[in-house]
Image (cartoon, rainbow, N blue to C red):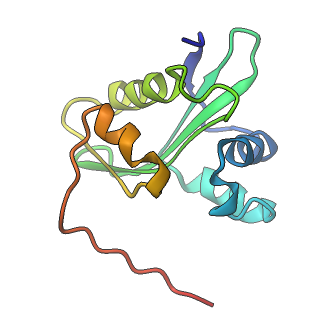
Amino acid sequence: MTAVVCAREQALPVEEFRRVLVASGLGATRPVDDAPRLRQMLAAAGLVMTARTPAGRLVGVARCLSDGAWVAYLAELAVDGGVQGQGVGRTLLQAVRDELGPDVSLVLASVPDAVAFYEKVGMPRMPDVFFYRRTR
C-alpha cells in the first residue's frame, strides 16, 4: 500500500488537478485543456480532498458537489496510474466519507473501468439513475 496523507484542499492548483486527471486516465473525459473550466470545477466544488505522498506529490483527488446535509455527488475520484491498485483510491474515498459525516449519502456515476472498484469498496449499484448531457 502506498502511504498517503489525505486532506481537504480547496485551493488546489489547477495544474496539479490537471496532471492527476491525465495520469489517472480521466483526461479523456474531462476538459483537461481548458484551464478556466478546470478552475471553475475546483472553485464550485463543495469538497476537494487530496492524497499526497509524504514528500508532497499529489497522487489522488476526490472532487464532490454537496449540500453538506443530505447528499454529495462524487464528480471525480482520480488516482495517478502509477499508484492505482495500491489502496490510494480506497483511502481517499474513506477520507471523503469521514469529511462528509454519517448523515450525507455519497453518490457517483462511474466510468465503466471503475465499476468493479466501487463494488469492491461496498458501494451498491442503483438501478434508476438518469443522465442527461447536452452535446454540442
Quarter of the figure with residue 41: bottom right
* Total numbered badges shown on the rendered structure: 0
Quarter of the figure with residue 123: top left
Q: Nearer the viewer, residue 118 or 13?
A: 118
Instruction: Please say if 19 is above or below 75.
Output: above
What residue do we see at 68% from left, 47% from top?
21
What residue do we see at 18% from left, 63% from top?
127
Residue found at the far bottom of this picture = 136
Quarter that holds the N terminus? top right
Q: In the rendered view, does 58 fall on the left or right side of 66? A: right
Residue 92, how many percent across, how many down? 48, 27
What residue do we see at 78% from left, 65% from top?
34
Residue 81, how many percent across, how many down? 67, 35
Q: In the rendered view, does 25 fall on the left or right side of 129? A: right
Residue 95, how many percent across, how many down? 42, 24
Q: Nearer the viewer, residue 84 or 104?
A: 84
